Amino acid sequence: SSDSQHHNTQILEKAGILNKTKIAENGKRVRKNWTQSWTVLHGGVLTFHKDPKSAAGGTSNKTNQIVPEFTLELRGAVIGWASKDKSSKKNVLELKTRSGAEFLVQYDTESIINDWHKVIVDTIRQLDLD
Ligand code: I3S
C-alpha cells in the first residue's frame, strides 16, 4: 500500500457514544446485549469501550469509561442499514466483519448515526484500495 492511501485511512477518525450489541459470531446467533459504548474509529479499527455501568466493580468512574472492550477490524467488513426485523430500534446499522461476527450499532439522533455510517463506509472502501 502506498503512503498516501495509508494516510487517507489514518485521517478517517471519529469518536463518540453509540449503542451496540453483538448478534452473531462465527455465523452463529448470540443473544443481544445492548450496551452504550464510547466508540473510537482509528486506523481502520473500531474500538468499543466498556459501559461504565457494567465495568468491573460496578462503579461509574472516568477510568472505567476508557477501558477497551473489543475491537473490530473494518478491512473486508460490510455495513448497511439493518432491516426492521433485526431490531425494533430506529437508526440501526448492521456491521459484518470478515471474521464472521455481526454487530448492530444504533443511536437515536439521525445525524450522528448518519455520520458514523458515512465514515465507516468510506473507511471500508479505503481499506479495499490498500
Ligand atoms: O431480537 P430480540 O430478541 O427481540 O432483542 C431484544 C432482546 O435482546 C431484549 O432483551 P431480552 O432478550 O432480555 O428480552 C432487549 O431488551 C431488546 O432491546 C432487544 O430488542 P431490540 O428490538 O431493542 O433490538
Image (cartoon, grey):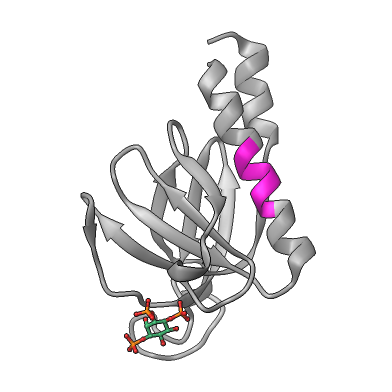
Whole-percent x, y for residue 48 in the image: 47, 60
Is residue 61 placed above or below 70 in the rendered structure?
below
Along the line of sight, the residue nearer the viewer: 120 or 27:
27
Is residue 62 placed above or below 76 in the rendered structure?
below
Residue furthest to the right: 111
Q: Is residue 67 left or right of residue 57?
A: right
Whole-percent x, y for residue 9 in the image: 62, 29
Q: Main secondary structure of the magenta part?
A: helix
Query: Dividing the image into four equal quarters, which quarter contains ligand 1?
Result: bottom left
Q: Is residue 1 left or right of residue 121?
A: left
Residue furthest to the top: 2
Q: Which residues are magenta?
A: 116-121
Q: Residue at x 70, y 45 (%)?
A: 118
Whole-percent x, y for residue 16 in the image: 66, 63
Q: Residue at x 53, y 84 (%)?
A: 61
Along the line of sight, the residue nearer the viewer: 33 or 39:
33
Residue 34 appears in the figure? yes
Q: Residue at x 46, y 87 (%)?
A: 53
Q: Is residue 107 left or right of residue 60?
A: right
**How many circles with numbers are drawn on the protein?**
0
Q: Residue at x 63, y 17 (%)?
A: 5
Along the line of sight, the residue nearer the viewer: 77 or 17:
77
Residue 20 appears in the figure? no
Whole-percent x, y for residue 116 in the image: 66, 53
Is residue 17 placed above or below 6 in the rendered structure?
below
